[in-house]
Image (spheres, rainbow, N blue to C red):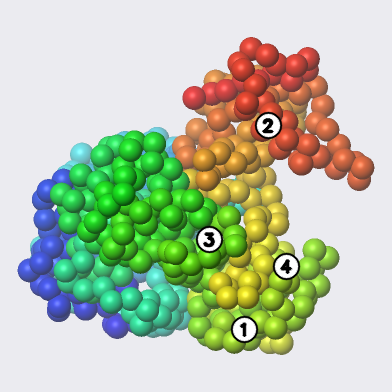
Amino acid sequence: MDGTLSGRFLRGLALAPERPALRIDGAAVAYRELHERALLLAGSLLAGFPGRPPAVGVLAGKGPTAYAALLAGLHSGAVVVPLQPAFPVARTRQMIEAAGVGALIADDDALPALTALHENGVRLPTLFAPGGQPMPVIPVDPDSTLKAPMPARPADVAHVLFTSGSTGRPKGVPVTHANTAHYFALLDERYDFGPRDVFSQTFDLNFDCAIFDLFCAWGAGATVVPVPARAYAHLPEFVAEQGLTVWFSTPSAITLVRRTGGLAPGALPSLRRSFFAGEALSRRDAEDWMAAAPGTVLENLYGPTELTITVSAHRWRPGREHPHDMVPIGDVHRGHRVLLLADDGSPSGGDSPSTDERSPNVGEEGELCIAGPQLTPGYLDPADDAGRFLERDGQRFYRTGDRVRRTERDGWLYLGRQDAQAQVHGVRVELAEVDAAVRACPGVEDAVTVAVPVDGTAELAVFHTGAPVPPARLARHLRELLPAAVVPRAYHHLDALPLNTNRKTDRRELTSRAEALRRRPAGSASRGEGRQEAQ
């Protein structure tokens, strides 16, 4: 069990059985209590389903019962598919069907989502303790409580996470027990987490960085504290009240806390480690956070879902000369191989077989490709693999789509996206997926989505042709298909999309227009182009 996520929880249970594994709104749940609850739910699930389900959907928010539901899914030994109750029902149904989910475990926040799924034709046996839900019921059966988590082999899939897909549907990424075992073994060597630590938990459970929060903490007998949205307005008070020692979020959180006055020097004295991932981290943000948390060690982490949570790290050193405006992403984890691709797809300056060795090509730029033990076996739908993986010297590399440069002393520096993807508040978005969703709106003929940099993250803007569809109608349509965090903020109607010299849509021109229109006062639209925003 040591190599599984359940096995990591058992480590924490052995270290601190009566200490809180979880604290929400002041109420603590001890390791022993959380474990027993998860064994009860897992046993009930297996008893109520004819044979072990091929995949279990965990439909859970971040409330008191969500974490027992997630842990129960892992304890059951089935493939776990975290599902976000706030997502549009059509998107959740796509995920359920793509992953082959045979049963659901739902938490207290999931009843509206269960009802919506049922109304959309989903009929899955569901373990939902409060009752009153419309799905076929799996009863909670104390007589079926498991004595221990079900075993798993390293090659077995532990969980499936979904990323944005260029085809207009989300892509499923299976992550194996071997992937997570390698990942957490490296983190155990790098960090000194222990039972006295208290971790923030800022990410939704369907976001891979949440696995870092939970299983770094639970593998060390530490406490996890979900951070509610209201806490950001008074973050120093929340951090002090909860005794947080470890913080992990997207860099966007720094901007938010700065706006609310929470980054005064020394405002976050209890933090001893701080991690940021999901977006580019600026030098200013790093310096301001460390001024507020002078006792912290700050690291910028990087990694696409396909490479198991994070696959590189850079430790920021205050007071040292930093030649870059953005914080580097550091060196790729040991045991992995790095390949750079030039713009034409050919190898750029060779490759580095291990990040223990410095690449000889300091200053080389290219698309970052990575092979190694954290790499997913491939997407759920093999058709999605095309263009994302390549073979070289008997190894399979993932093409991240991220452009990087090798620095002399700080590892890799992130330069931006190479393809039509964007990071919006830490969520990776295929702009083509948004395009497809907009085109499905009645009256729209064609659509192009661009990302506009705003306060360290990005906002999406849509340019569309056809009928001048009101922005409120477009936004309502997209909220039925896309997560709320990535629904575009601005909508601009055009008579025709601009073309470049190759007669392709000129995305660079549209991005420039979107930036200019964002700065333009409302009501000053030019002919043929409306500035329309949907809040």
Q: Secondary structure at mark 3?
A: loop
Q: Is residue 118 visible?
A: no
| Amino acid of disc 3 | Val
Kindly identify which numbered label has been placed on residue 358.
1
Q: Is residue 399 above or below residue 116?
A: below
The circle drawn on residue 327 is 3
Using the image, determine if residue 516 lies above or below residue 504.
above
Residue at (46% x, 58% y) in the render: 277
What is the distance, in whole Å, between disc 1 and disc 4 at their CAs?
15 Å
User: Looking at the image, do the residues carrying marks 1 and 4 touch, with CB atoms under 8 Å apart?
Assistant: no
Using the rendered image of the protein, determine whether residue 425 is visible from the camera's viewpoint: yes
Q: Nearer the viewer, mark 2 or mark 3?
A: 3
> Secondary structure beneath disc 4?
strand
Which is more N-terminal, label 3 or label 2?
3
Across and down, in percent, residue 299 comes to 42, 65
Numbered disc in front, either 2 or 4: 4
Q: Is 52 placed left or right of 242 in the picture?
A: right
Q: Residue at x 10, y 72 (%)?
A: 17
Q: CA distance from mark 4 to mark 3?
A: 16 Å
Of callouts 3 and 1, the N-terminal one: 3
* Neighbourhood count class around disc 1 (C-alpha, 10 Å): few under 14, some 14–19, many 20 upward: some
Residue 365: give its label: 4
Give the residue at mark 2.
Answer: 514
Q: Amino acid at mark 4?
A: Glu
In front of the other: 445 or 102: 445
